Amino acid sequence: MNRMSRRTFLYLSAVAAGTWSLNACTAGDDSGSTSDGGNRGGQEPGRSGSAVEPLPKPTTFQQAPSLEGQDLPPVEERLPENPYVIPHSWVQPGKYGGTINMNVFSSTGAATADSDREFFYGHSPLRFLNDGKDVVGGLVESWETNDDASEWTFRFRKGLKWSDGEAWTTENIIWWWQEFVLAQKMAVTPPDETRSGKGNLAEFEAVDETTLKLTFDTPAPLTADRMAAYVNGAIGKNGAIWMMPSHYLKQFHPDSGKNVPEDWDTVGGLMESKADWHRNPDCPTMTGFKCKSFDNTSGVVLERNPYYYAVMPNGDQLPYVDEIQIKVISDAEAGKLQVQQGSVDYCHGPFNQIALGDVQGLRDSSQRAGTEVVLWDSGSGTGSIFFFNYDYIDDDLRALIREPKFRQAVSHAFNREAVQKSVYFNTGERTTGTHSPKAAEFQVDDTGAALYRQWRDAYVEYNPDKAKQMLDELGVKDTDGDGLRELPNGKKLALRIDVQADASVESKTKDNQLISDLKAVGIAMTSNPIAPQAFDDQWKSGKLIAHSNWEVANVGISLIQPFWLIPVEATRWAPLEGQWYSGLGTGSNDKETDVDPWERRPPRMDAEKDGPIAKLWDLYNRARVEPDRMKQIELVWEIEKLHISDGPFFMGCVANYPQVIVAKTDLRNVPRKENLALGGLVNPWGHPTPAVYDPECFYWENPS
């Protein structure tokens, strides 16, 4: 049976069975097929969260037996003076040895399987703990800032080493900054954490080999939070690069290497291929594993980094397993079959197109495969999303789209309960569409929690009669008696959901429900497939009406990833105004002032004076430089209140549904939902999962 027919069958006929299966996953049973809160995965039962204060340095250290006889320095000399001690409450000392077999879905080969790197947090200066609630040191041991957060000093762990044994120093950061960011090479752009509230770049100073100072021209209170986001490193596909092994890579740079080709810094060129530790066995890395072999067609084999700077509380140097073998699959259904047959030891569902509709099949095969299903919270604020183009090129439709009452009417016409059943198997919570329910401003106190509920519930009610009344009040009525509404000027109202042709089944199911629901209140809408490679340009130029096949999820305070709250770039709900904001301070907005906004290069327009976007920009500009955390959160609340009063600017369906993880029953230290501070936060790449849970501490009960 082909992929589409199997998925369609699951969604149309397995809702009840899937819901039962998911309930079993959370409750547990005796088959060994689902998480039951016991100690199958090696976690301490009943313990959750991670220590925020650094754990004591162990008095002794142990290494993997496989490292014996490899002519390496003693383990104590390979570690920094103060290693990173794994702080998770659910982990226990493990056993060395063995291999973890995984697969990853990629239609273009292993080189572009960026999700592989989401397992490894070793390049990040700072780290998120407790599902984004806390920021702690990673490569950095301690840091401080002045009173107005305009000067930040980071002290890295003394004695850090690259995987080849060479010393790590702040020169590795300065080389990246000067030779790639400032020089604008290899398409590297400055990360958000290096810009001030005015948009200007920080001044970088390597005080000494382990101390870095960043100085901004305005307060930059979000610096630490943003430095913890993403796994970072490599070639910048998973966050900022931040550091490069310059002792190795200088030979491929024209200023220091010999016979370096002129196109050395092009995308896919010499430097990019050499600087990617994921595919170059010779490239040193700071992650727990290094590349052993790489084949773009078959996959990658990773082996232990003997200089990795993380240890268990008992002094075991990590990682525990000897190797990770990641096989590339280009057919998602074939990958699921491998999981069901037991040839995959750990499967991160979101990276392999495994979702809630697959749980029943995975559960049925679990005893034979020796696996269990683990469910972690997605942290999504929307589930599959829908939003209009606030800057659509047609004057009549744009005017209607910008009417809050019109978008509110569409939201009330949408039967989210039906989508919750057919797509999310009665999990999660129905929502108007918000930022993540786990965002810091919602977790801080009762006021934040109440605001989240207010936003979630604002326009979530399924009430077709209310929707019809609101449309009538706008003058959007059926004037010719054909059952479909016209615009106030008498023109036919015809809407489209412009979707990428490779949209997921989940997204298509939701879109079909919305199209049907809108027809029931007299609005004609069709689905319009767009080639993926053409979609982005058409959206940014205001030529597409509505967007689907996306979702909203974020980590920490929503200012870290503000794109859905504030139009600050060109891919979301107000693309031309987002492009205008991103050009502030560059001089680009002073050009082409007499050109139609949709004809400018790139297309862009200023916000309407006193309109909602102008208000959002003003609040954002104040919040991003506010050093007092509570005052900053209060400004974020004001932003979110505008999304309630003038929104919805984007519409969700089901928030915080579970994501599916499959692990062998004897693979230990894999956390369960009850072990995680907020039950998990899988979806935002800014909160790199599973890297935040340190897979280097996974181990086999029987490594042989």
Image (cartoon, helix red, strand yellow):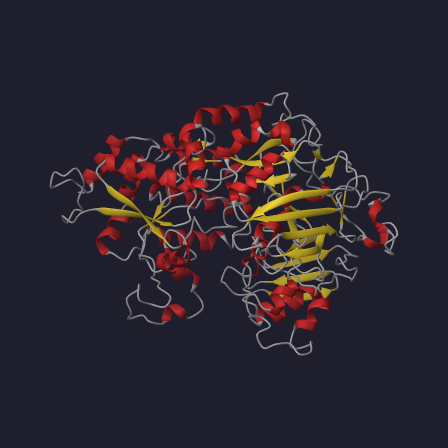
Q: Which part of the image, by quadrant, shows the C terminus?
A: top right
Viewer-closest of 609 and 50: 50
User: Residue at the front extreme?
Assistant: 1
Identify the residue shown where x is 46% and y is 54%: 622
What x and y, as percent, mark residue 496? Answer: 29, 48
Q: Number of marks in the image?
A: 0
User: Residue at the left extreme?
Assistant: 480
Question: Quarter of the image holding residue 244?
Answer: bottom right
Viewer-closest of 143 and 184: 184
From the viewer's perspective, is 542 left or right of 678? left
Viewer-closest of 95 and 657: 95
Question: Quarter of the image holding residue 241?
Answer: bottom right
Identify the residue shown where x is 73% and y is 38%: 699
From the viewer's perspective, is 701 left or right of 174? right
What x and y, as percent, mark residue 598? Answer: 30, 63
Work out whether residue 348 can be spotted. yes
What x and y, as percent, mark residue 634? Answer: 48, 44
Identify whether 192 is placed above or below 697.
Answer: below
Identify whether 237 is placed above or below 372.
Answer: below
What x and y, as percent, mark residue 530? Answer: 36, 53
Identify the residue shown where x is 83% and y is 50%: 67
Work out whether residue 278 can be spotted. no
Identify whether 534 is placed above or below 83.
Answer: below
User: Residue at the top extreme?
Assistant: 30
Question: Quarter of the image holding residue 175?
Answer: bottom right
